[in-house]
Image (cartoon, rainbow, N blue to C red):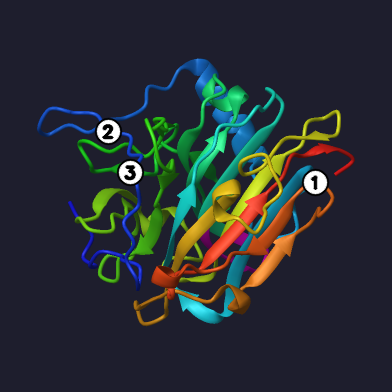
Amino acid sequence: MEPSFSSLKPTKQVKNKIENRIRVECPKGTVPILKNTKSYFANAQYWAERHFNPLTDESHGKHIAGVREQGRGPYHGVAAWMSVHDLNVSRDQASYANIYAGSVLNNKTNFIQIGWMVNPSLFGDGQTWRYGFWKGADGKGCYTTTCSGFIQVSQTDLLSGPIPRPRKGDRAIFPSIVQDEVSGNWWTQHVRNFKKDIPIGYWPKELFDIIGHSVNMVGVTGAVQVSPSGISPPMGNGHLPTKHEGESARVRHLLIVTSKFKIKEPEMNELEKLLDSNKCYGLRDGKKRFFQKNANLLMYGGPGGKSC
């Protein structure tokens, strides 16, 4: 199965140094599914209840740094190139970065997120993992494939798993969340600049009760879960963003799928900026390089610490 829409591509394509895909080789007619142990399932349920909600102010014990667009929709998707980093995070903390699409209506919240996360309690190690999360009808929510919901279709590319470290160059992912105009299902793909995008799978529209046709908010954010002791973990690459792109955790080529299923690459000054703790974290626009005139750039992150 494949989505009916065409590939997502930035307005100005710039070849990235490396493509950090999680690949396996499954026999024909089968797909890769992460094995769910009892402890992983229990931890996934626990973190699903505490998971950061990007659409509301209900984020006790969380800190965020990101941008979003709302009010000019409806929207049918979002994608972005995101740098990936290793972080020192304790078992009662989490640090992650993601794109998201969702809606809030009459005290109901539906959204989908996909990105990367360091969460030793959930994944059982301190590695940086790719992950997906959804929250739908009746308040149900689920990580990756720990419960029924996400439909894996790729035989080679997983929704979730440790992100490999490159020998050199950028460590990055280019995830997407896009609604299929024909079926209404929400697909995620690996966006590739000069090759065909790889459909990983989809969340059926039946999982949701208010985003069956579109969403009213899309964005990209870094987020952390604070430990009960009040200590906040690092976000992004663990450093406050500077004017130098290579020194900062960054997001490039933020793409939004409009109400007419057209792709736009907004200017950062058009987006609402969200930063709730400038003591421990930062957020700033980056300068465009001469060969990236149409490429938006956002830099974020910070060391965390006490009393953030």
Residue interval drawn in magenta = 100-109
Q: Is residue 213 above or below residue 108?
A: below
Of mark 1 and mark 3, the one earlier in the sequence is 3
Magenta region, main secondary structure: strand
Q: Is residue 112 above or below residue 12?
A: above
- Residue at image position (56%, 32%) is 86
**Residue 163 percent location from the top left of the image:** 42, 33
Residue 101 lies within the magenta run: yes
Q: Amino acid at mark 2?
A: Arg
Q: Secondary structure at mark 2?
A: loop
Q: Is residue 227 above or below residue 107?
A: above
Q: Amino acid at mark 3?
A: Glu
Q: Secondary structure at mark 1?
A: loop
> In the image, which disc is placed on residue 23?
2
Total label count?
3
Residue 204 lies within the magenta run: no
> In the image, which disc is placed on residue 19?
3
Which residue is label 1 attached to?
280
Q: Amino acid at mark 1?
A: Cys
Separation (CA) of disc 1 from disc 2: 35 Å
**Residue 298 percent location from the top left of the image:** 58, 61
Q: Is residue 8 above or below residue 96?
A: below
Q: Nearer the viewer, residue 152 or 69?
A: 69
Q: Quadrant of the C terminus?
A: top right
**Residue 241 percent location from the top left of the image:** 67, 52
